Structures are given as structure tokens and as C-alpha cells.
Image (cartoon, helix red, strand yellow):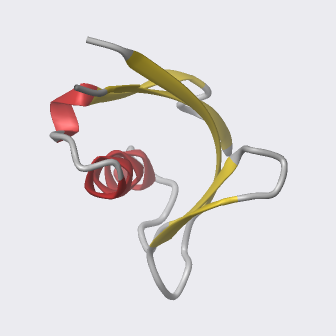
Amino acid sequence: MPTRIIRLKVKPNSHVSSLSELPDGSWLAQVKAPATEGRANREVISLVAEHFRCVKADVSIKHGAAGRVKLVSIRTG
């Protein structure tokens, strides 16, 4: 299966959940969940899986789980 790696900036505690690509090729994820107890990370995984039309098990945070900038791996195919 091919794997895609994206650079993702997360903004927790947003009013709306959304995922959008920025002009520099990175992505911005705005999530409603707070950045505590992994809640924002779980919402990021769900948001990425929904956007790229794959199951949540195909999405993983490779780097930056505790920070706002993450490298996310997406298995496609």
C-alpha cells in the first residue's frame, strides 16, 4: 500500500472542525477538542481519515503527537 506523509498544524478548541491545505503544501486541522488527554489527536485522526476516505486505522501520527505541528502518515489504496 502506498503511504502519504503530510505535515499538519493543529489548532485545538476551534468552533468548527475542518481540514484544509495551505499554499505551502502543509495542512491545517482545526478541531473542537481540547489538547488534553489525546482528545485533539483522536479528532485529528478522524478528520484526516474522513478527508482522505480511508479508515482510521490507516492514519497515524508519526511525529509531534505532543505538539501542534505533526507528521501524519496515511496509507492509501
Q: Residue furthest bottom?
A: 15
Splitting the image into 4 quarters, where does residue 69 fall? Answer: top right
Q: Is residue 1 visible?
A: yes
Front residue of this view, candidates 40 and 16? 16
Location of the N terminus by quadrant is top left
Relative to the observer, which residue lies in front, 76 or 46? 76
Residue 21: x and y in percent read: 65, 57
Tell me the residue at 24%/28% (across/down): 58
Residue at 48% across, 68% down: 31
The image shows residue 22 at horizontal and vertical percentages of 74, 58
Q: Residue at x 53, y 31 (%)?
A: 65
Q: For the C terminus, which image quadrant?
A: top left
**x%, y% of residue 67?**
66, 37
Q: Is residue 37 left or right of residue 71?
A: left
> Residue at image x 44%, y 75%?
17
- Considering every residue shown, the one lying at the far top of the view is 1
Residue 23 appears left or right of 66: right
> How far across and down, in percent of the image, does residue 63 sit?
58, 20
Which one is nearer the viewer's eye here, 45 or 23?
23
> For the image shown, how many numbered marks are present on the structure?
0
Quarter of the view holding residue 38: top left
> Is residue 67 visible to us here?
no
- State whether residue 9 is above or below residue 16: above
